[in-house]
């Protein structure tokens, strides 16, 4: 882990990468933690002196560790589930490649490394440049400075000659333009047939109109996120992507309400409702 000296300037959406890092660090040090992320704890401790000088209200708040407990639990449960997706994939394909699209400050490689895993983090140049100042790459772990829509990262991935690839988009697609997300998925299917995609989505009604404004207000009020952090991409139903191409196969879905974890409190009852389970959830696809 490297030391940090300079200030940070991120866009509203990029700041969510630090929010999720701190949520994992907070949960890791809680009583009976959902997950333990030692790298997140170490990184948060090193970032504190930098963030407390930031002009961003959100970043300064992270230093206090006073983040909405519902967000901490949600993010921890989601990270744990995406780890499970990757680990299950690796059990079937020990030499597989995992690609974390829009990775932010996530430390999944260090949590799931089986000794042979090849792992790629992909995010905007500003985010990756900062992440490289904290975490070290190695021969099996590479951070790529590309927008997910800049397909230079796909060229790098093709050179690995990997036959088994899982693409993960945790907390990413909902912030992006719908047409671009659709084209990205179609291009992944074309260039990497046989791969799998695990992505988080929201119900389409939360991406526009009154519902969209409510979502933005909620993020701003609860987490001090800026106006740019609204939702743009959503699905009417989890199998909607299958209509994009005959080669896209729905494999299943997951909502953190379904975990029935005691830290969800009263929200556990929402796990019985199809409507709530498909408000913000994860879908798993095969790209044939």
Image (cartoon, rainbow, N blue to C red):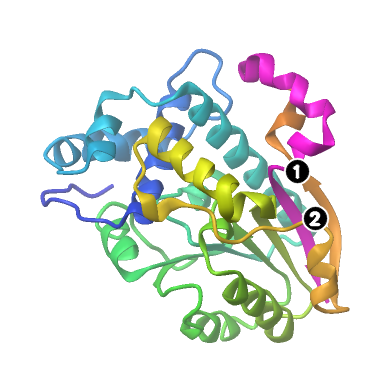
Is there any visible trace of residue 261 in the rendered image?
A: no
- Quarter of the picture containing the C terminus is bottom right
Residue 191 in the image: above or below residue 254: below
Residue at 23%, 40% (x, y): give it: 47
Residue at 59%, 45% (x, y): give it: 211
Question: Is residue 236 shown left or right of residue 95?
Answer: right
Chain part drawn in magenta? 261-288
Question: Is residue 205 shown left or right of residue 92?
Answer: left
The x, y position of residue 49, in whole percent, is: 14, 36
Instruction: Please rate how many residues cluster around mark 2, counting C-alpha atoms within 10 Å: few if below 14, some from 14 to 19, many from 20.
Output: many
Residue 233 in the image: above or below residue 267: below
74 or 197: nearer the viewer: 74
Instruction: Please rate how many residues cluster around mark 1, counting C-alpha atoms within 10 Å: few if below 14, some from 14 to 19, many from 20.
Output: many
Q: Mark number for residue 278?
A: 1
Give the SS element for disc 1.
loop
Residue at 36%, 33% (x, y): give it: 41
Q: Are marks 1 and 2 in contact (CB under 8 Å)?
A: yes
The x, y position of residue 286, in whole percent, is: 81, 67
> Distance from label 1 to label 2 (Cα)?
8 Å
Q: Residue furthest front?
A: 210
277 or 260: nearer the viewer: 277
Give the SS element for disc 2.
loop
Question: Is residue 257 shown left or right of residue 111?
Answer: right
Looking at the image, is mark 1 or mark 2 earlier in the sequence? 2
- Quarter-wise, where is residue 51 in the image? top left
Q: Is 269 covered by the magenta stretch?
A: yes
Residue identifier under label 2:
238
Question: Is residue 83 shown left or right of residue 127?
Answer: right
């Amino acid at each position: 882990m490297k030391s940090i000296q300079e200030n940070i300037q991120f866009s509203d959406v990029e700041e969510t990468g630090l929010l999720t890092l701190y949520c994992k660090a907070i949960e890791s040090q809680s009583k009976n933690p959902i997950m333990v992320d030692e790298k997140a704890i170490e990184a948060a401790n090193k970032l504190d002196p930098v963030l407390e000088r930031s002009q961003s209200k959100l970043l300064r708040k992270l230093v206090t560790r006073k983040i909405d407990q519902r967000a901490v639990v949600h993010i921890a449960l989601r990270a744990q589930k995406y780890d499970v997706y990757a680990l299950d994939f690796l059990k079937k394909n020990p030499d597989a490649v995992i690609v974390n699209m829009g990775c932010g400050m996530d430390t999944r490689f260090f949590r799931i490394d089986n000794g042979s895993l090849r792992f790629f983090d992909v995010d905007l140049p500003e985010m990756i440049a900062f992440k490289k100042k904290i975490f070290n790459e190695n021969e099996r772990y590479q951070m790529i400075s590309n927008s997910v829509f800049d397909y230079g990262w796909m060229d790098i991935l093709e050179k690995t000659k990997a036959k088994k690839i899982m693409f993960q988009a945790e907390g990413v697609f909902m912030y992006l333009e719908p047409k671009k997300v659709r084209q990205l998925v179609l291009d992944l299917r074309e260039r990497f047939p046989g791969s799998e995609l695990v992505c988080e989505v929201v119900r389409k009604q939360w991406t526009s109109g009154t519902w969209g404004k409510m979502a933005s207000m909620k993020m701003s009020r609860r987490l001090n996120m800026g106006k740019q952090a609204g939702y743009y991409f959503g699905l009417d139903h989890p199998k909607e992507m299958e209509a994009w191409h005959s080669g896209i196969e729905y494999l299943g879905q997951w909502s953190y309400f379904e975990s029935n974890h005691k830290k969800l409190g009263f929200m556990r009852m929402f796990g019985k409702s199809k409507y709530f389970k498909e408000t913000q959830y994860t879908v798993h696809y095969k790209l044939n």
